[in-house]
Amino acid sequence: MRPASLRRARWLAHPDGVGAPAAMRDWLTTPGSLTARLIAHSGHFRVQKLRQASNVCLADEAGAIGLARPQRVWEREVLLRCDDRPVVYGHTVVPMSASASDWPLFSALGERSLGTTLFHDPKVTRGELEFARLRPGHPLLARVHDVLGPFDADSPAKETYFARRCLYRRRQGVLLVTEVFLSAVLDLAAPATHMNTNTK
């Protein structure tokens, strides 16, 4: 595979195309709110905001949000943590043309969950999920490795990650959310385990 092609992921409409193991596929195809599922699978959930500022979008994001080429967008990066372990890396981009009325809460989210906001707003329309294998060389993986540090110390240069993304619309605005699933998500206990623990 040519190095330039690694900078773009092949996004597919069906999860079977990415060849994820069964347990990871189950997370990739989570219906409804991923945040709600993570909360149910952990004793303590939190959103760690890493960055929220303007930046040039990735090559495989531009077309998805209606841009002819990569341009500056509003970007948000977070880690979703369950019991203080990072389990999902979230990357959101919004075109600079979007107005405050399109996404009124985006700039003030802080460490609140974007997913919770999207699923509780009746004006938001959710598109279809797309799925991909992010291989070494993709820009998002460089960011994941920078953030995780020792969590990926065993194989930072070779690991392939599974990801999904979804386009949301509100009024005249669009917003693209990409979620990269970390291997730790497979270690999360079932909801019943936490319920039993809390009742002892």
Image (cartoon, grey):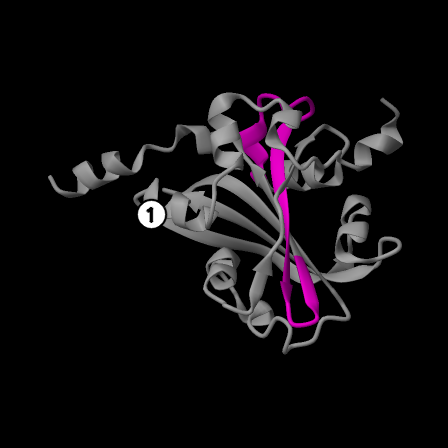
Please state if 14 lies on the left or on the right of 6 as rendered.
Answer: left
Residue 171, placed above or below residue 147: below
Whole-percent x, y for residue 198 in the image: 18, 43
Magenta segment includes 171: yes
Whole-percent x, y for residue 156 in the image: 64, 26
Magenta segment includes 36: no
Stretch of the chain drawn in magenta: 148-175
Residue 66, placed above or below residue 141: below
Q: The residue tagged with tag 1: helix, strand or loop?
A: loop
Residue in the image at 21% along x and 41% along y = 195
The N terminus - image quarter: top right
Q: Which residue is mark 1?
A: 44
- When asked about the image quadrant of residue 81, the answer is top left
- Mark 1: give few (<14), some (14-19) or many (20+) Cα within 10 Å: few
Whole-percent x, y for residue 129 in the image: 61, 44
- When asked about the image quadrant of residue 159, the answer is top right
Residue 82 in view here: yes
Tell me the amino acid under the disc marked 1: His
Residue 118, placed above or below residue 166: below
Whole-percent x, y for residue 98 in the image: 72, 71
Question: In this orientation, which residue lies closer to the viewer: 40 or 17?
Answer: 17
Residue 160 in view here: no
Residue 76, placed above or below residue 155: below
Residue in the image at 53% along x and 47% along y = 79
Please state if 19 lies on the left or on the right of 194 as rendered.
Answer: right
Please state if 191 lies on the left or on the right of 7 as rendered.
Answer: left
Question: In this orientation, which residue lies closer to the viewer: 117 or 4?
Answer: 117
Residue in the image at 76% along x and 49% along y = 61
